[in-house]
Structures are given as C-alpha cells and as structure tokens.
C-alpha cells in the first residue's frame, strides 16, 4: 500500500493551479451573504477550469482554489424546511386571532387581563416565526469526483439557491468543460486527484481525517482501474 500511495502522489500533469488574485480570466462571479448567520461566500470561475473560493464566517476567513477537473460534475443543492417551527407559528397565529376576537365580547373587567395575553401571544408568534425562518436553510455543496471529499459547503437562508441560479448554470457548464479536459487515462486522473486532495489538505480545506478517507477511496478506485 505505501508504494501505491507514492505512485499516486506523483504526476506528470504540468498544469499549475492559479494562485488567488493571479487569474488571467474571470468567467463568472457569485457573492452571497447570510446576515443572520454572519456568513459570506465569494465564488469566481477563473481560467476556465478553476474555482476561486472565499468564505467568511464571523471573523474566520478561508480562501482557496479548486481544480474543476477533480470535482464531481453534479452540484449538490438541498433545502431544509423547519416544518415544526412553521407549524407552531401557524398554530400560535390562529390562537392569537381567536383571542383577539374574544376580547370584544368579554366584560370590561376581563378585557383588562385579556389584552396583555393577546399581546404576549403576538410576541410569541413573531419569535417562533423568526426561529422557523432562521432554521429553514438552503445548502450548496461541491464534492471531489472519486475521493468524495466535501470541498465546499455553504448554508444560507431561503432564496439563496434561487439567487445563485445564473452562476450555477455557468459553473455547471465549466464543470462539463473540465470533465472533457480530464486525463484520458483513469490511472493518471486518479493520480492527479490524489495530488489535489493533498494540496487542499495542506491549504487547510481538508482535515487529516477527511484526507485519509478520500485517499482510501481513490486508492480503492485505482486498484479497480
């Protein structure tokens, strides 16, 4: 096994990944911000086959470049709806409306106590609704082709995926172009993908555990190839 790793980490592919800020061509740009989560995502498609990534979460900033030749062609997009919180919001809203309708029919003495109850229900409904909106999220993810390592994940609020559709269509087109630019030999491609995972580990994108898992998958795929 150690000898196989050595073979895979060597590559005759001379194409170098461009450094951040040194791209010759810019083909598309996405800037997305989630105010509630204090997250910012900046994506740039550069030099045809590369994706510049910059993420900021509170004060933590991570910037790196992905080689699209080693990315899974399918862009993963998902939505999580906080149904329990939204259902609770509707139930509280209905209860608030019912309480407000009953206030007028109550004796004046009882109205004095009912009005604060209705106001409290309104405040509770708003708070629960905001939590439901916060917990309803949309996520964008990119994974490596054979190592199946998660190379990018950004979670934003409702509407994030819709706003990013034009960029995602352009990114999908460049992923198809990068797929055609892969090495003709599968063994050579896996060798390059191994080096890409190692580069991303050194850049802090992949943890040691993620790197070891993806390396094992690539080595298994290389054995089958």
Image (cartoon, rainbow, N blue to C red):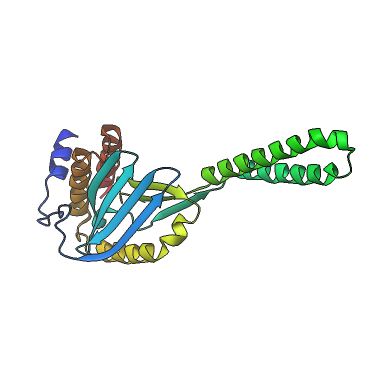
| Residue occupying the point 83% across, 42% down | 103
Left or right, 62 with reference to 11: right
The answer to whether residue 212 of the structure is visible from this angle is yes
For the image, the number of numbered tags is 0
Q: Nearer the viewer, residue 35 or 144?
A: 35
Of the 4 image quadrants, the one containing the N terminus is: top left
Q: Residue 179: image x %, image y %?
A: 27, 62
Left or right, 192 with reference to 54: left
The answer to whether residue 149 of the structure is visible from this angle is no
Left or right, 5 with reference to 124: left
**Rendered view: 184 above or below 149:** below
- Residue 170, by quadrant, is bottom left
Left or right, 95 with reference to 174: right
- Residue 214, by quadrant, is top left
| Residue occupying the point 25% across, 42% down | 219
Q: Residue 215: image x %, image y %?
A: 25, 39
Q: Nearer the viewer, residue 61 or 121?
A: 121
Q: Residue 148: image x %, image y %?
A: 33, 45
| Residue occupying the point 56% across, 47% down | 81
Q: Residue 141: image x %, image y %?
A: 38, 50
């Amino acid at each position: 096994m150690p000898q196989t790793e050595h073979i895979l980490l060597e590559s005759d592919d001379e194409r170098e990944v461009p450094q951040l800020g040194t791209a010759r061509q810019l083909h598309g740009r996405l800037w997305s911000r989630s105010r509630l989560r204090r997250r910012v995502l900046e994506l740039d498609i550069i030099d045809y086959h590369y994706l510049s990534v910059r993420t900021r979460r509170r004060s933590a900033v991570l910037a790196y470049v992905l080689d699209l030749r080693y990315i899974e062609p399918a862009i993963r997009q998902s939505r999580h709806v906080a149904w329990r919180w939204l259902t609770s919001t509707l139930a509280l809203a209905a209860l608030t409306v019912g309480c407000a309708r009953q206030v007028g029919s109550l004796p004046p003495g009882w109205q004095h106590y009912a009005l604060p109850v209705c106001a409290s229900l309104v405040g509770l409904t708003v708070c629960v609704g905001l939590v439901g909106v916060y917990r309803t999220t949309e996520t964008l993810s990119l994974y490596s082709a054979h190592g199946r390592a998660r190379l990018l994940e950004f979670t934003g609020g409702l509407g994030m995926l819709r706003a990013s559709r034009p960029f995602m269509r352009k990114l999908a087109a460049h992923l198809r172009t990068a797929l055609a630019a892969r090495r003709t030999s599968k063994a050579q491609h896996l060798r390059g993908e191994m080096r890409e995972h190692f580069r991303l580990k050194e850049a802090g994108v992949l943890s040691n555990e993620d790197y070891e898992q993806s390396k094992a998958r690539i080595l298994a795929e290389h054995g089958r190839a």
